[in-house]
Image (cartoon, rainbow, N blue to C red):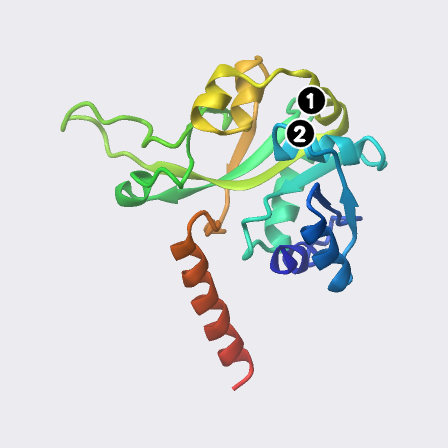
């Protein structure tokens, strides 16, 4: 969590950084490294529901949900998603994507997304989408989803009133609640390559990258 918090502190646009949790172990860990943290209800269905509780007590126009399993997130990524939403008043939610190859697309831990010609998400899935039906199909550029969202305050506070949807429950993807209830999510391609921690192997690889980067910066 400290890695995510420190990455968020690099943002030029973020006015406040708060860890929202229902776990006292996380609460105490954040307090120990000097971060700002708020306890929330343990009844929330998703991280966005938890974020909405905190947002109801904190003033602001745009709120960014940074997933706690993205330890290599940077302030530039946060600034990009904030600017994306701020520049498109027609959108209530914004997120970021990045190109991936077919091998990566086959990994169910990597969330994929397909978008329309205006950059709005059509669907998110753990399955490789779009499905290539035959060899005559045009070359496919799969898009992976980065675990970050920007919400306008009014929509974020409305989100918990939307019941968890069928597709959300199937895929275990909270953003599908937005789409299934008829709302849109605007996307943009980012240079950031998501390396979320979903498995023990992901964690081991992150530790190796982190130690190597520390060794290079402190020869």
- Residue 69 lies, with reference to residue 204, above or below; the image says above
- Residue 33 lies, with reference to residue 168, above or below; the image says below
Check disc 1 and report its element: helix, strand or loop.
Answer: helix
Q: Which residue is mark 2?
A: 44
Q: Quadrant of residue 114?
A: top left
Circles 1 and 2, Cβ within 8 Å, touching? The answer is yes
Residue 160, numbered circle: 1
Residue that lies at the very extreme toward the left in this rendered image: 135
Q: Residue at x 78, y 44 (%)?
A: 38
Check disc 2 and report its element: helix, strand or loop.
Answer: loop
Q: Residue at x 48, y 51 (%)?
A: 197
Q: Nearer the N terminus, badge 1 or badge 2?
A: 2
Q: Is residue 87 visible?
A: no
- At label 1, counting other C-alpha atoms closer than 10 Å, the crowd grade (few under 14, some 14-19, many 20 or more) is some
Q: Nearer the viewer, mark 1 or mark 2?
A: 2
Give the image location of residue 121, x and y in percent. 49, 25
- At label 2, counting other C-alpha atoms closer than 10 Å, the crowd grade (few under 14, some 14-19, many 20 or more) is some
């Amino acid at each position: 969590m400290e890695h995510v918090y420190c990455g968020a502190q690099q943002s030029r646009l973020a006015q406040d950084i708060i860890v929202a949790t229902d776990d006292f172990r996380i609460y105490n860990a954040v307090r120990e490294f000097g971060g700002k943290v708020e306890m929330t209800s343990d009844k929330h269905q998703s991280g966005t529901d938890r974020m909405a509780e905190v947002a109801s007590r904190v003033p602001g126009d745009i709120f960014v949900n940074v997933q706690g399993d993205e330890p290599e997130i940077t302030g530039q990524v946060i600034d990009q998603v904030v600017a994306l939403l701020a520049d498109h008043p027609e959108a209530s939610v914004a997120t970021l994507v990045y190109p991936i190859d077919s091998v990566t697309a086959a990994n169910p831990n990597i969330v994929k997304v397909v978008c329309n010609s205006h950059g709005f998400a059509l669907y998110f899935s753990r399955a490789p989408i779009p499905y290539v039906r035959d060899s005559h199909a045009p070359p496919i550029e799969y898009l992976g989803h980065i675990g970050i969202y920007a919400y306008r305050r009014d929509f974020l506070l409305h989100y918990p009133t939307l019941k968890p949807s069928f597709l959300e429950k199937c895929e275990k993807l909270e953003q599908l609640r937005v789409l299934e209830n008829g709302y849109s999510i605007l996307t943009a391609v980012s240079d950031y390559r998501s390396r979320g921690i979903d498995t023990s192997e992901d964690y081991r690889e992150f530790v190796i990258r982190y130690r190597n980067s520390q060794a290079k910066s402190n020869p």
